[in-house]
Amino acid sequence: MDALKAVIKVNLYLALGDSITKGYGVPNSFSFPRFYADFLRRHNPDLHMVNLGIDGLTTSGLLALLQHNHGLRLSVSQASLITLTIGSNDLLHLIGNPNQTINTTQLPILFNNMSKTLAQIGEEVRRLNPMATIKVATLYNPLPAGPYAVYMALAQGVIDNANAMIITWAKHYRFKVIYLDREFRGKEQLLISQDHVHPNAVGYQVIAKAFARY
C-alpha cells in the first residue's frame, strides 16, 4: 500500500485556485494547468493532472475546502506538485462599477482577514503534504485592458500590497512564487480577454510558461 501511494504521489499534479486555474473563458484544453501538464509530460509521460479550480473562489472558500472536503484533502496529500492562484476575488468587491471609486476604507480589514486566512491555508496544506512542490502565483492588474483603467494606479497599489503579503506567506511555507504580475505588466491588451478580467488563450499560455520556468 505504501509503495502504491508513493507511485501515485510522484505522478499527481494538482491545480488549485480560482477561475484563472479553472480556465474561465476558454475551452478546457486551453487552461493553463493543461498547458503546464503537457509541458511536464515531456519529462514524465505518466503524469496525471487534476484541475480543481473554481470560479469565484476566495481565500476563505479555499480554506473551507481544505478543512472539510475529503476528496480535495486526499488529492492535496497525494500530489507531488500543486499550483495555486488565489486572492483576486478577495479584492474584487472593492470595485463597484466604472463610475465608482475603489472602496479603500475596507482595505485594512480585508488585508488583515486575508493574511490570517492565508496562514491557515499554509498550515493546512503543509499538514496534509509537507513535501510537495507548491507554486503560488502573484496577482496581475487587468485594469489597463478595460473600462476600469481610470483606477489603474490606485488598483496597482492595492495589488502590490496583496502581492507583498502573498510573497511573504509563500516563502514562509516553502512555496515557490510565480510572478504573474511581471508577466502581464505592459502586455494587458494582448493577454486579457474581452471581459477585461481573465486571460485570453494567449494569456493562459503565458501563465503556463511562467509556472514552467520557475
Image (cartoon, helix red, strand yellow):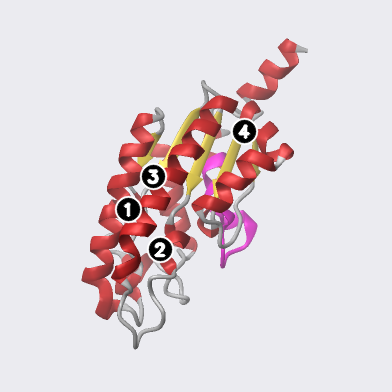
Residue located 49% across and 38% down the image: 120
The answer to whether any part of residue 186 appears in the image is no
Looking at the image, is mark 2 or mark 3 nearer the viewer?
A: 2
State how far apart marks 4 and 1 are (Cα).
25 Å
Q: Which mark is residue 162?
A: 1
CB atoms of marks 2 and 3 within 8 Å: no
Q: Is residue 6 above or below residue 85?
A: above
Residue 95 seen anywhere in this rendered image of the structure: yes
Q: CA distance from mark 3 to mark 1?
A: 19 Å
Residue at figure coordinates x 38%, y 46% from the top left: 115
Dot 2 or dot 4: first in sequence order is 4
Mark 1: which amino acid?
Ala
Label 2: element kind: helix
Mark before the other along the chain sequence, 3 or 1: 1
* Disc 2 versus disc 4: nearer the observer: 2
Residue at (50%, 39%) from the top-left corner?
A: 121
Residue 95 lies, in percent from the top left, at: 38, 75
What's the mark number on residue 91?
Answer: 2
Residue 162 x, y percent position in the rendering:
32, 53
Helix, strand or loop at label 3? It is: helix
Q: Is residue 30 magenta?
A: yes
